[in-house]
Amino acid sequence: MVGTHIGVYKITHLLGEGGMGTVYEAVHEQLGKRVAIKVLRSDMARNSEGLTRFFNEARAVNLIEHPGLVQIFEFGEMPSGSAYLVMEYLQGETLSQRLKRRGQLPEPEALYLCYQLAAILAAVHERGIVHRDLKPSNIMLVADSAMPSGERVKLLDFGVAKLAIALHAAESQVRTHSGQTLGTPQYMSPEQCRDVSQVDGMTDVYALGVILYQMLS
């Protein structure tokens, strides 16, 4: 897709691929603004449940409005039938990349990153949303001079998040079946392993504890 257009944005680079889709760097040709565009996998775009989950990510993030969440500006469907999200472009590294590069982190650094993550999760849970896939590769670390450490944590990827039933009517179209497993096993609480449909915010807290252990050890 590099060199093609999605609306007013020109795709310039491939940034990465995930379970739900591919992320590209793009630029608004008139304003010169850089953005990231996530394009849903074509097989998932043909599935109404996958499409609803994809758009729920945009609704959830904009409902919470927290600086620790990547901003999503717009979403839509392409002529091919696939779907896309236009997101804030972030420069930095994931926590997964940092741990691979540096190994064990100093205790003050690990605790401050954990503190920021806990604050983000508190805002998420307050709106009745459960992330359900908290892991180092979904945590971005970006430079921010407004933060005491000079660095801000950004939580990514609400693709498998559990939204409060009252959030909007579209959520009722997504059925998480009893006994179904969603998430990344290494970071999943025992109750999430048993039945993802019954978990609450505590499953994210469990994953946060695993991540803190990983940063310190």
Image (cartoon, grey):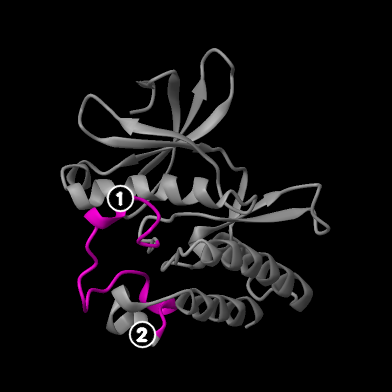
Q: Is residue 146 left or right of residue 28?
A: right
From this viewpoint, which residue is outermost toward the front?
166
Image quarter of residue 84: top left
Q: In this view, does 40 lie to the left or right of 49?
A: right
Q: Establish if 9 lies above or below 207.
A: above
Can residue 187 be seen?
yes
Q: Establish if 84 lies above or below 186.
A: above
Residue topped by disc 1: 169
Q: Pinpoint residue 23: horizontal percent, then vertical percent.
A: 41, 41
* Residue 146 painted magenta: no
Which residue is at the front of the view, 72 or 209? 72
The secondary structure type at the circle numbered 2 is helix
- Image quarter (top left, top right, bottom left or bottom right) of the N terminus: top left
Amino acid type shown at disc 1: Ala
Amino acid type shown at disc 2: Glu
Image quarter of residue 178: bottom left
Marks 1 and 2, how far apart at CA: 27 Å
- Image quarter (top left, top right, bottom left or bottom right) of the C terminus: bottom right
Q: Pinpoint residue 21: horizontal percent, then vertical percent.
A: 32, 46
Q: Pinpoint residue 147: horizontal percent, then vertical percent.
A: 79, 54
Q: Any mark on residue 191, and which? A: 2
Can residue 20 be seen?
no
Part of the protein shown in magenta: 164-189
Number of residues whose C-alpha sits closer than 10 Å to that of mark 2, classed few (under 14), some (14–19) or many (20 or more): some
Q: In this view, does 51 lie to the left or right of 3?
A: left
Q: In this view, does 200 lie to the left or right of 80?
A: right
N-terminal-most mark, 1 or 2: 1
